[in-house]
Amino acid sequence: MNTPGMLDAVRCVAGRDLLCALRRRSDVVTSLIFFVIVASLFPLGVGPETAMLRMMGPGVVWVAALLASMLALGRLFASDYADGTLEQLTLAPQPLSILVLAKVAAHWFASGLPLVVVAPLLGFQFDLSADALMILLASLLLGTPTLSLIGAIGAALTLGLRGGGALLSLLVLPLYVPVLIFGAGAVEAGAAGLGATAHLSLLGALLLMALVFAPWATAVALRIAVE
Amino acid sequence: MTSNINWFKYASPATFYPLAGRLVPWFFIAAVLFAVPGIYVGFFVAPTDFQQGEAYRIIFIHVATAWMSMFLYVVMAFWAGVGLAFNTRLSSMMASAVAPTGALMTFIALWSGALWGKPMWGAWWVWDARLTSELILLFLYLGFMSLQAAIDDPRRADKAGAVIALVGVVNVPIIYFSVQWWNTLHQGASVSLTRSPSMAAAMLVGMLLMALAVWMYSIAATLLRVRCIILERERHSEWIGQLKELQK
């Protein structure tokens, strides 16, 4: 019997995770609703003045996206850890970091991409202009995969621990800060007429860095967790 | 010819424990010896700053602890990384012992900075790049400590902590260069190795004395803490049972 190649393994892991996400649609919908509710709370809290909302809109959408993607992290490895799939993955002949990358990609498709798709709706709530909306979309599209990649490290480290959720946020949120600064900053720079290219390039650089290092760190953390 | 020196003699908790015990008082004494003249120079000898008045004297604590907060994070990540790579117990214990002192230094740096910021900038806190990244440093220390506290198995705690410590190291150069990269409210460095300092000699002496004092204190506190960790983790081993100080 031939061992499957690396690409086959990646396709298999990602396909399985996507199928699982498709069968449990309520999980995806719940975190989407969370995203919308958190962003809708801000106008209620600070008052409905359009000028102020327009100014804080991008930041609020970004913070809400950050929290929603953090809430979804718990699902990334937890069920695989519980039913032993994770141990099988660590025993697989393919490098674990590649399999982790496949899992994170599937996770982003199921939880990050829907956030990007819904974001324009929230943008209308905050009365953002069409240009600002386009930049917001671009920054979310570049930034949310980075969030999933960094979050995977935290999710792997906190597998099976007491108080996992709060601990996960303590570990992951400080590491999310650069993405938040450049993501929300892109929209503000665009609105100020400075051009968003610099911020978007930095977001892209963060994504590339995370693509290289995060799966590897996550793989180390997973091996520690299943040891 | 092979060397007769055993470089790893003190890598074992059993030999390091008594060594640390002998070193702790000396480092505490050194800390006091540096701190007393440092505070004296800082408060009585150093001239009043022509721009900032008397309030600038907070820097004698602020700068020393801020330097130490960044340096201790690197030390912590270094020992955690050594522990992860070579599976040495003592290195991981050192990392756990450094973390609370590092968090304390970060907290003092932030707090003294706030006390300085109120008369200078008119605000306790501004969202400037360096303040924000120093605050993130505090969160990283707290995250490292809470992750280790949440794991019951000490070996897993060591390794998991090492991963998060190494990931967080990215933040240290960001804090260090934030003043140059973003050029925001926090002033740039006045002390540098490559050019003459832009301050009076007495100020510089006071600051260096305080930095040395903080340095000595950190070493003493870390060694004291690592002794406690060794006792706790190695309590089932034979050499601990034979320690003189534990026998009545």
Image (cartoon, coloured by chain):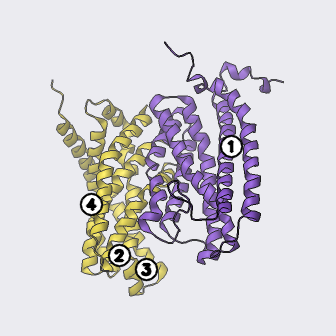
Chain colours: A yellow, B purple
Residue A1, image quadrant: top left
Q: Secondary structure at mark 1?
A: helix
A27, A148: nearer the viewer: A148
1 vs 2, front mark: 1
Q: Which mark is residue B239?
A: none
Q: Earlier in the sequence, mark 3 or mark 2?
A: 3
Residue A113, disc: 4
In the rendered structure, the answer to whether residue A99 lies left or right of residue B175 reads left
Front-most of residues B126 and B54: B54
Amino acid type for the residue under numbered disc 2? Glu
Name the chain under label 2: A
> Residues at badges 4 and 1 in contact (C-beta under 8 Å)?
no
Mark pair 4, 2: CA separation: 22 Å
Report the front residue among A154 and B219: B219
SS class of the residue under badge 2? Answer: helix
Spatial CA distance of label 1 from label 3 is 48 Å
- Asked whether the residues under the numbered discs 3 and 2 touch, taking CB atoms below 8 Å apart as contact, a structural biologist would say no
The residue pinned by badge 3 equals A43
